[in-house]
Image (cartoon, rainbow, N blue to C red):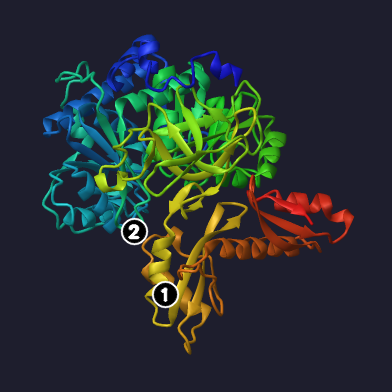
């Protein structure tokens, strides 16, 4: 904690902002210009379309990146984008995605959209943000992004211009010659004009902006949360919050000579701010392998060879990726590595140990959220790390553990190790105006300043933050938020179903997977297979389709008839842990699942014999939920 305290006073939330204290640039373009001036010929951003360690890659120097961003920002302005207008992008990772993310926020307001969403959800976000320009893929083999966006634009009539990015330019000859003959065809029923992104950018000047850069603080990005139900919440991010996140990365994580590999999507705040903005601030080199990142073909198999190729010093990852990597040998020279940074979901202790043993590298675990522009806390890279915690609050970030009433009034502040709601104030929190829709900001803040995260947690005597659960019922699958309401509504539409409770069941790979418990209409009958098929048909997002459905005689309910989900979570923990123990040939079983004030739900196990202790620790160490012997 002393390493953070030596930088600045953590509690100086409003008195002195970091860009004032440290004389930081007042705009993202000024930040990019300063870094480009200092590191002009050094590599800034690299992207390779395919995952082979010798495959072709495109690398931009800092001078080249600034030129590309300048051209794109000038293009957006020429298309009628002003400071309050929105440039949306629906793209996988590529050089153009990074350029659009930066340039869109320079010219106007940038709005990244998850390309894995279905067309109705994409359309809903475009309508909510009132986007005028959309940057997306030109039709390309083995992806349906172009078709989904074309369909979405029919329901988003405010979009005036579509700029297409053609991934074909990354392919070597002769593959580049083949794509035009196998390119998918789709009918475009929308009225927006369609232009080629590269061709239009090339017409713009790369040496200077054709408009005055805005240096007053303003909203420069819209990031959606979820979006699975067709009614997305859109968080507003100010320039000050973006620069704050970048400053934190430059001060505490990255050095100018670092090479950062980030196979995470640039539509997510994790890659956009703690990574890309930190690179912009520090002058480090960011490497993005394949459009799909960790999901890309061969990325996990070739990952350690990519580390060797690029001489990576900093790995950016999430628990699901760590789990997959630990099922593969470290088959390359990874001596360049200094750290790995993990976020988006809790990290199982067993995975932490396995990664460190396999690589010799310590995982730094942190915490952030879209509504706070991202970063909140981290285990200090150069200081004490507490496994299981998400570290200590960053400079200029104040975290309080509170009990609040429904209107956000603080009823009590929690003491040391007492569980309550995690509430955050820092330069990334836009107090009172976090979401674009005013009604969604009602009762979202404690003391009108502290963002109520919906996460439950505690702070120990040393100031380390622990997340123990969620006040909200979101299911977090591999860092991706799934709304249980969509699952419940879909299953409730079946004529045989009376009540549904959807929760996240523990999973050693994804952290949580969606599962559903069902109570049938009296006298009705239905098979699990029929319910599964109904779910697949009626749930829009594939990731939200339950992996387990179980029919109970009666669901547990509260006094007012609401489904009581804590009992369902206990049932799911016991089932999953028992299945894992049985699969490993162990005799131990879950006796019960109790609520612990500090740790949340804890599975208590009956011994199957003392000799099993180490084996049980290995099996259950793969999960994030704690356990103990009876």
Whichever of labels 2 and 1 marks the residue nearer the N terminus, that label is 2
Can you say which quadrant of the picture contains the C terminus? bottom right
Q: Going by the image, does 166 lie left or right of 424?
A: left
Q: Badge 2: how crowded within 10 Å, few (<14), some, or many (20+)?
A: some
257 sits left or right of 241 in the view: right
In percent of width and height, residue 532 lies at 47, 73
Q: Is residue 541 visible?
A: yes
Disc 1 crowd, CA 10 A, few/some/many (<14, 14-19, 20+): some
Q: Position of residue 255 (x, y in %)?
A: 51, 17
Q: Quick check: marks 2 and 1 in contact, CB under 8 Å?
A: no
Look at the picture and state if 507 lies above or below 212: below
**Which residue is under mark 1?**
534
Residue 429 in the image, given as x and y percentages of width and height: 37, 32
The relative height of residue 144 versus residue 562 in the rendered view (above or below) is above
Element carrying mark 1: helix
Is 496 in front, or is 557?
Answer: 557
Which residue is at a point 36% across and 23% down the rendered structure image? 243
Using the image, determine if residue 414 lies above or below residue 62: below
Q: Nearer the viewer, residue 311 or 464?
A: 464
Instruction: Give the alpha-carbon distance from disc 2 to disc 1, as whole Å.
Output: 17 Å
Q: Which mark is residue 177?
A: none
Whether 155 is drawn above or below 526: the answer is above
Residue at the bottom extreme, as displayed: 523
Q: Position of residue 269 (x, y in %)?
A: 40, 37
- According to the picture, the residue beneath numbered tag 2 turns out to be 229
Of the pair 326 and 301, the residue shown nearer to us: 326
Secondary structure beneath dot 2 equals loop
Residue 50 in view (yes/no): no
């Amino acid at each position: 904690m002393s390493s953070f305290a030596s930088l600045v006073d953590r509690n100086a939330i409003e008195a002195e902002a970091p860009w004032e204290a440290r004389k930081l640039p007042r705009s993202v373009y000024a930040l990019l210009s300063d870094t480009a001036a200092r590191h002009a010929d050094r590599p800034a951003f690299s992207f390779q379309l395919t995952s082979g360690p010798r495959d072709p890659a495109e690398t931009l120097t800092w001078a080249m990146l600034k030129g590309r961003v300048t051209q794109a920002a000038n293009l957006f302005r020429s298309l009628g984008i002003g400071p309050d207008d929105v440039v949306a992008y629906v793209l996988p990772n590529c050089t153009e995605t990074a350029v659009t993310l930066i340039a869109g926020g320079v010219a106007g307001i940038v709005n990244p959209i998850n390309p894995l969403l279905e067309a109705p959800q994409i359309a809903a976000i475009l309508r909510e943000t009132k986007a005028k320009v959309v940057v997306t893929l030109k039709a390309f083999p083995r992806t349906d992004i172009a078709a989904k966006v074309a369909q979405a634009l029919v329901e988003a009539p405010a979009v005036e211009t579509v700029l297409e990015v053609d991934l074909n330019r990354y392919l070597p000859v002769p593959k580049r010659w083949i794509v035009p003959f196998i390119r998918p065809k789709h009918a475009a029923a929308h009225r927006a004009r369609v232009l080629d992104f590269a061709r239009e950018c090339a017409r713009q000047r790369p040496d200077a902006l054709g408009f005055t850069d805005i240096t007053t603080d303003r909203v420069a990005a819209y990031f959606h949360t979820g979006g699975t139900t067709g009614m997305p919440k859109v968080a507003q991010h100010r320039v000050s919050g973006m620069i704050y996140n970048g400053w934190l990365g430059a001060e505490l994580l990255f050095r100018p000579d670092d090479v950062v590999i980030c196979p995470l999507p640039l539509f997510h705040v994790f890659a956009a701010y703690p990574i890309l903005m930190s690179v912009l601030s520090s002058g480090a080199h960011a490497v993005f392998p394949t459009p799909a990142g960790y999901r890309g073909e061969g990325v996990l198999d070739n990952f350690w060879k990519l580390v060797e190729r690029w001489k990576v010093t900093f790995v950016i990852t999430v628990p699901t990726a760590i789990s997959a990597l630990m099922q593969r040998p470290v088959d390359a020279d990874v001596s360049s590595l200094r750290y790995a940074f993990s976020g988006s979901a809790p990290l199982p202790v067993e995975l932490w140990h396995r990664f460190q043993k396999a690589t010799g590298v310590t995982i730094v675990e942190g915490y952030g959220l879209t509504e706070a522009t991202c970063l909140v806390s981290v285990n200090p890279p150069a200081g004490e790390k507490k496994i299981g915690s998400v570290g200590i609050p960053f400079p200029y970030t104040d975290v309080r553990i509170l009990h609040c009433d429904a209107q956000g009034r603080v009823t009590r502040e929690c003491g040391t190790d007492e569980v309550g709601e995690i509430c955050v104030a820092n330069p990334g929190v836009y107090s009172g105006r976090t979401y674009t829709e005013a009604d969604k900001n009602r009762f979202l803040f404690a003391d009108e300043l502290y963002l109520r995260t919906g996460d439950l947690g505690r702070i120990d005597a040393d100031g380390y933050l622990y997340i123990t659960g969620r006040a909200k019922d979101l299911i977090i699958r591999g860092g991706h938020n799934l709304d249980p309401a969509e699952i419940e509504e879909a299953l409730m539409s079946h004529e045989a179903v009376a009540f549904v409770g959807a929760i996240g069941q523990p999973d050693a790979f994804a952290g949580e997977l969606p599962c559903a418990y069902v109570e049938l209409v009296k006298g009705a009958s239905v098979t699990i297979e029929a319910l599964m098929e109904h779910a697949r048909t009626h749930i829009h997002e594939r990731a939200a389709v339950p992996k387990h459905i179980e029919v109970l005689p009666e669901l547990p309910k509260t006094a007012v008839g609401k489904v009581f989900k804590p009992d369902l979570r206990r049932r799911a923990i016991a089932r999953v842990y028992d299945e894992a123990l049985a699969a490993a040939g162990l005799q131990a079983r879950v006796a019960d699942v109790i609520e612990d004030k500090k740790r949340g739900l804890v599975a208590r196990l009956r011994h199957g014999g003392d000799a099993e202790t180490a084996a049980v620790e290995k099996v259950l160490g793969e999960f994030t939920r704690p356990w103990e012997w009876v």
